[in-house]
Amino acid sequence: MRPLALEVHIELSLQGHWALVGGASQGIGQATARALAEQGARVILMSRRSEVLEQVRNSLPNPTQHRTLALDLERLEDISTSLGRLVADIGHVTIWVNNTGGPKAGPLSEASPDEMERAFRGHVLSSQVILRALLPGMKTANYGRIINVLSTSVRIPIPNLGVSNIVRGAMASWAKTLSLELGASGITVNNILPGFTETPRLESLINGAVAKTAKSEEEVRNEWVKTIPAGRIGLPTETAAAIAFLASPAAAYISGVSIPVDGGRTGSL
Ligand SMILES: NC(=O)c1ccc[n+]([C@@H]2O[C@H](COP(=O)([O-])OP(=O)(O)OC[C@H]3O[C@@H](n4cnc5c(N)ncnc54)[C@H](OP(=O)(O)O)[C@@H]3O)[C@@H](O)[C@H]2O)c1
């Protein structure tokens, strides 16, 4: 038996890495871009709104070393072309935070096949296109961190988020399958499952609940907070902190898992 190495060194620095962060114009993606930049990564901020991405980039430490990439993840050909160009220009992208907007709310039984197809394109198919663009670089570097931002609905489906529940389940299975295939290449694949988190997405879900129930915004918020053991809504920086750890060298032996960042709310093991 080999002697155990007892010295502990927790390596959190992302110096020398390029990180692609989806949904970087606001919410969890924006907080994550900042966290990774603060840990030393050079960040590619991706979403549809180029002007907002530029503003976020300019607010990061060392703004000139980061890039923006304006893309609609529902347009698969654009993703392929843009990422091909990017990789040819900068080389390996070894960290990928796979994050985008959630599908429209509503019961599954009322969702049209078109709605479902659009959500699959923007989440599952776009993930596959990005994977194929980044994977060769991760393999060459023998370092890869794929972190998917999903939802606690991976564990327990959420009422009135029908299409989202289906797409998140598919993404969780996609991630687990990849983690089994890629483990030997130094690539980990994990999922972060946000609970209620203070972002524009939460605002729109609250507004939807207000319109449906005739309750006030405060009443809706209070009802939701009552379900959270931590007694409050989470901050996007708290989600970003978990993502930043998974992106680091310290998390090399964590793969194929789904981690709720939800103040203890998810009622499953
Ligand atoms: N906040 C919560 O309470 C909560 C809870 C559970 C799960 N989640 C999930 O976690 C993820 C992030 O949440 P969030 O609250 O930060 O969401 P958010 O505030 O809605 O932000 C979504 C981000 O995705 C980008 N985006 C949307 N559609 C896109 C498209 N077609 N192509 C490229 N980029 C697109 C948006 O930027 P542009 O408009 O610039 O494209 C934006 O930066 C979402 O999937 C959400 O459903 C959130």
Image (cartoon, helix red, strand yellow):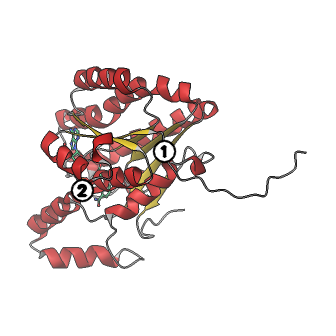
Locate residue 7 relative to residue 81 in the image: left or right: right
Quarter of the image with the N terminus in it = top right
- Asked which quadrant contains residue 156, the reply is bottom left
Q: Amino acid at mark 2?
A: Asn
Check contact, mark 2 vs mark 1: CB within 8 A: no
Q: Amino acid at mark 1?
A: Gln
Q: Can you tell which of label 2 and label 1 is closer to the viewer?
A: 1
Q: In this rendering, does residue 25 appear at all?
A: no
- Residue 75 percent across, percent down from the top left: 21, 27
- Residue 247 percent across, percent down from the top left: 49, 47
- Asked which quadrant contains residue 197, the reply is bottom left
Locate residue 45 relative to residue 188 in the image: left or right: left
Quarter of the image with the C terminus in it = bottom right
- In this view, the residue in front, 223 or 175, is 175
Residue at x-position 34% and y-position 23%: 89
Label 1 secondary element: loop
Q: In this rendering, does residue 96 appear at all?
A: yes
Residue on which disc 2 sits: 160
Residue on which disc 1 sits: 15
Relative height, residue 160 to residue 63 (above, below): below
- Residue 194 percent across, percent down from the top left: 37, 58
Q: How packed is label 2: few (under 14 Cα within 10 Å), some, or many (20 or more)?
A: some
- In this view, the residue in front, 157 or 64, is 64
